[in-house]
Image (cartoon, rainbow, N blue to C red):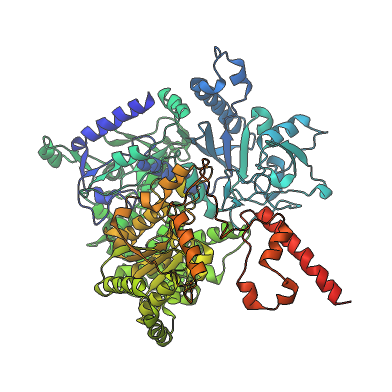
């Protein structure tokens, strides 16, 4: 039902796009960088910020939260309150035979009431102290149940010695508080995951994404960034342990597995309530981004068509609505609430305010442009003496904006301002829309509005000491705001609150490229931490090291990223714009892939070709010439070499490698199996080189995990030929993923992005392995079932090069294997093949098998050639272990005898 309601609202917005047209929009964007792409100039369908849950809406709430940070500093507490479906309200309400999970209306109503009570306990009950600001956001993950992310700003800052009084990350003592002990074990124990549960959803590449188990710590410690390291005592130091039940076993856990919580809130609400102390201002933007990220979305691929940017279609394509969220939205419960109110203040140049118009009222709108909060501020300063003492951003504290009359009025309620009996102050905060530094005039205007009190006009802002300046930048210079790069320092410091490190680096690159700062090195030194923060966080996560600090290598990596941006913008290095030049030694990983493919000895390779070319047989020569023909003409194409074992496939491929690499071009060698990869010069597994997804049989449209601009992407863009051995073992989706990836990376929609790809394999051997699959599943997964197969040219190798001296027995054995592989050998009723006695001997015991394959092994143990000519292949590891054990017994006894 709610999906239909939302679809109707979106349809209304789509049909009213013409009525929502706006001029001068470029100066008013609120720091969202992806509204338009310079390469796209088609129709723009906007999803406005008034639509709850869309990107602009969530962005505005995040910016409003940052306003709290600007006024009140970092939040004191970050709380996550998750609904407990087993609470007594759910179990006590009659469900008429339905399961409680079917009553989404009850879930919504009960959680709403509990959340109201929860916020009253925090704010009115002041359980942690007096609250100055607060906000929360509701989310529904794909599991369906709601949870709320809450930020609290306390009037009095929490001191380190208070943390243990309100937050615990330990198992309570059951002998002193059995109730709390039961609640903590039921709601606050993470997992356990890892070795206890390898299928836990928190595991990413075998490691817990939530970084559990944590370390034992005797006393709570404040980290330099992020959350504190809470006290988690060892059992021998007084810490408690508990036994938790898993599916088929019981596990003993200790304090390392406990999620931080408030004992008071846990006992009051009996739910999962994670309470964290916010320790550093640097972490706040990650918290705010997390709080306002919105609910889960479905995954989809977006393809541009006719240069059309359609935000409504993009939103609908990724929209995921759970039944519980639908019930909540039908009841019109809010998904965001906050205190105090944040008033948005317009930011525009003179005569550059937003004008909403249609074709019918265009002339009227142009003749009577609407008043905005900025022009209203100017009018207020002309007529109100108290307003002349205020900055633009402080006006909402003392005045309210009348949206109908477009004027500011004095507040009628609130505390009386000392010395001004007719002025009252409220709790509302003002937020001036942010402006990108590329909009230079608007940017300098905003800077002046944050420095000059009580201006009466745009002209007044440009007037300094009685002199009217032509531009806002000149006025800033006259006020000394631009001396010593003050404006760029301010810009970067403000960006710390609202932007990610990547965006801050982009801003810094723009400043270096176009703004000519007087001391770029000083700017870097003052702001290098905020530009390197994501690199530090990534290293912390990869190394599971929570207290890792900034290092020169981290700063160097940030400088490399900045230099790459400056090179893209103006084609100059950092040293050319007065900055420190990064060491690219630390970035060798970026070019190591290409260097690896170009560091072959050309003379040695060409000499190898000269020696091996005459040894190619007729079939090999035909394939050799065809590949070189495509290579010389730079024609893309895919060739499949059908090569049964022993037909010289690897020999041929290595000659082709030597030929292409000897001419200083890149020829990539990959194989589906690791053993096959080792047989090719410079060979690697396909999954390693091409980053093919692992779970191919569950993904209909996979793509390889290779990003544009990465080292592997550069190699694939420069490569001339890709050789892929044992392709018959690869799932068809693997080759299809490579095709999509190459087309994207190389900017070419031809097959494999125009790259020559030589596939090799034998479909008579092992086919793709499908877990618990049938024969039909294997055939469906086979490359021959792919839509790409019809574009593949098949060439065959038929001469078995391992049969020497015209040995008839070897030839008959080879023909027999081919007959089985081609499905020509007769089968029994059960579909099994009865092996010929000519090539098969039944051994009754393992010892007899070893004696047949390795006769007189103690006499030939030093004969390498003799050992290379024989092997025992076991299909199961268990059989292999038995064979090895039996072999050791047989081998060791004679050795012991000879040493006596």
In the displayed image of the protein, which residue is found farthest to the right? 900
Frontmost residue, 583 versus 21: 583
The one nearer the camera, 708 or 691, is 691
Could you tell me residue 658's position as x and y percent?
A: 40, 79
Q: Is residue 47 visible?
A: no
Q: Which quadrant is home to the C terminus?
A: bottom right
Where is residue 836, by image quadrant? Answer: bottom right
- The image shows residue 855 at horizontal and vertical percentages of 70, 69
Q: Is residue 359 left or right of residue 669?
A: left
Which residue is at the front of the view, 1 or 286?
1
Q: Residue at coordinates 48% horizontally, 40% vertically from top-left? A: 418
Residue drawn at the location 70% of the way across and 32% of the way down: 183
Q: Is residue 547 above or below residue 27?
A: below
Residue 108 x/y as whole percent: 50, 24
Q: Point out residue 113 in the picture as x, y percentages from the top left corner.
A: 54, 23
Residue 474, placed above or below residue 312:
below
Q: Is residue 119 visible?
A: yes
- The N terminus sits in image quarter: top left
């Amino acid at each position: 039902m709610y999906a239909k309601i939302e679809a109707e609202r979106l349809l209304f917005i789509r049909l009213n796009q013409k009525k929502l047209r706006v001029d001068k929009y470029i100066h008013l964007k609120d720091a969202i960088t992806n509204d338009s792409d310079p390469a796209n100039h088609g129709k723009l369908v906007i999803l406005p910020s008034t639509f709850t849950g869309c990107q602009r809406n969530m962005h505005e709430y995040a910016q409003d939260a940052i306003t709290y940070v600007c006024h009140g500093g970092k939040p004191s507490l970050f709380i996550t309150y998750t609904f407990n479906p087993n609470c007594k309200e759910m179990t006590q309400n009659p469900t008429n035979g339905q399961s409680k999970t079917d009553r989404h209306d009850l879930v919504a109503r009960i959680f709403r009431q509990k959340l109201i009570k929860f916020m009253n306990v925090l704010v009115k009950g002041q359980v942690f102290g007096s609250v100055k600001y607060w906000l929360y956001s509701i989310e529904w993950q794909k599991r369906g149940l709601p949870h709320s992310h809450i930020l609290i700003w306390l009037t009095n800052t929490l001191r380190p010695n208070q943390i243990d009084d309100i937050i615990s990350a330990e198992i309570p003592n059951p002998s002193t508080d059995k109730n709390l002990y039961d609640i903590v074990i039921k709601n606050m124990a993470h997992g356990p995951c890892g070795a206890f549960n390898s299928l836990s959803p928190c595991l990413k590449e075998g490691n817990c994404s939530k970084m559990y188990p944590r370390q034992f710590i005797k006393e709570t410690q404040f980290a330099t960034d992020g959350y504190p390291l809470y006290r988690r005592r060892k059992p021998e130091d007084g810490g408690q342990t508990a036994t938790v039940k898993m599916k088929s076993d019981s596990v003993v856990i200790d304090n390392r597995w406990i999620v931080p919580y408030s004992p008071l809130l846990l006992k009051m609400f009996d739910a999962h309530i994670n309470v964290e102390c916010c320790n550093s201002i640097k972490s706040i933007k990650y918290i705010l981004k997390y709080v306002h990220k919105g609910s889960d979305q479905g995954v989809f691929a977006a393809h541009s068509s006719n240069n059309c940017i359609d935000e409504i279609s993009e939103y609908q394509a990724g929209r995921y609505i759970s039944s519980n969220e639908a019930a909540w939205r039908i009841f019109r419960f809010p998904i965001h609430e906050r205190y105090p109110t944040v008033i948005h203040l317009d930011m525009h140049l003179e005569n550059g305010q937003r004008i909403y118009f249609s074709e019918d009222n265009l002339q009227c709108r142009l003749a009577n442009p609407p008043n905005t909060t900025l022009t209203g501020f100017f009018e207020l300063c002309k007529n109100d003496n108290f307003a002349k003492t205020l900055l633009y951003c402080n006006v909402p504290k003392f005045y309210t904006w009348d949206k109908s009359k477009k004027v500011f009025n004095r507040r009628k309620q609130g505390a009386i301002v000392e010395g001004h009996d007719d002025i009252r102050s409220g709790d509302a905060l003002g937020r001036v829309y942010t402006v990108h530094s590329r909009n230079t005039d608007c940017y300098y205007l905003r800077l002046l509005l944050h420095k000059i009190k009580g201006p009466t006009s745009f002209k007044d802002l440009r007037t300094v000491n009685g002199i009217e300046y032509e531009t806002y930048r000149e006025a800033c210079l006259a006020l000394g705001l631009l001396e010593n790069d003050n404006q760029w320092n301010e810009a970067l410091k403000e960006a710390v609150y609202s932007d990610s490190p990547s965006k801050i680096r982009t801003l810094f690159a723009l400043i270096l490229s176009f703004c000519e700062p007087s001391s770029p090195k000083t700017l870097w030194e003052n702001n290098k931490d905020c530009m390197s923060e994501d690199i530090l966080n990534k290293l912390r996560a990869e190394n599971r090291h929570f207290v890792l600090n900034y290092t020169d290598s981290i700063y160097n990596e940030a400088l490399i990223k900045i230099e790459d941006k400056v090179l893209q913008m103006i084609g100059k290095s950092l040293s050319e714009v007065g900055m420190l030049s990064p060491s690219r030694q630390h970035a060798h990983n970026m070019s190591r892939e290409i260097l690896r493919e170009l560091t072959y000895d050309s003379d040695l390779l060409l000499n190898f070709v000269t020696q091996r070319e005459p040894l190619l047989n007729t079939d090999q020569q035909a394939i050799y010439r065809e590949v070189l023909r495509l290579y010389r003409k730079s024609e893309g194409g895919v060739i499949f070499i059908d090569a049964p074992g022993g037909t010289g496939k690897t020999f041929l491929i290595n000659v082709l490698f030597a030929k292409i690499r000897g001419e200083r071009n890149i020829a990539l060698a990959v194989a589906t199996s690791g053993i096959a990869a080792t047989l090719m010069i410079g060979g690697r597994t396909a999954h390693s080189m091409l980053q093919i997804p692992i779970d191919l049989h569950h993904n209909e449209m996979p793509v390889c995990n290779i990003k544009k601009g990465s080292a592997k992407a550069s190699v694939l863009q420069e490569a001339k030929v890709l050789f892929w051995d044992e392709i018959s073992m690869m799932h068809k989706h693997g080759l299809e993923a490579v095709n999509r990836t190459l087309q994207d990376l190389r900017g070419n929609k031809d097959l494999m992005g125009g790259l020559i790809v030589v596939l090799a394999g034998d479909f008579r051997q092992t086919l793709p392995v499908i877990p618990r699959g049938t024969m039909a599943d294997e055939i469906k997964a086979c490359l021959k079932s792919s839509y790409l197969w019809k574009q593949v040219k098949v060439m065959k190798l038929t001469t078995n090069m391992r049969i020497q001296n015209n040995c008839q027995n070897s030839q008959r054995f080879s023909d027999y294997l081919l007959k089985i592989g081609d499905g020509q050998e007769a089968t029994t009723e059960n579909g099994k093949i009865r092996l010929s006695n000519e090539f098969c001997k039944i051994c009754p015991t393992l010892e007899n098998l070893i004696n047949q394959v390795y006769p007189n092994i103690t006499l030939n143990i030093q004969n390498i050639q003799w050992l290379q000519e024989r092997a025992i292949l076991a299909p199961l590891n268990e059989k292999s272990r038995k064979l090895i054990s039996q072999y050791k017994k047989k081998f060791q006894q004679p050795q012991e005898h000879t040493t006596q």
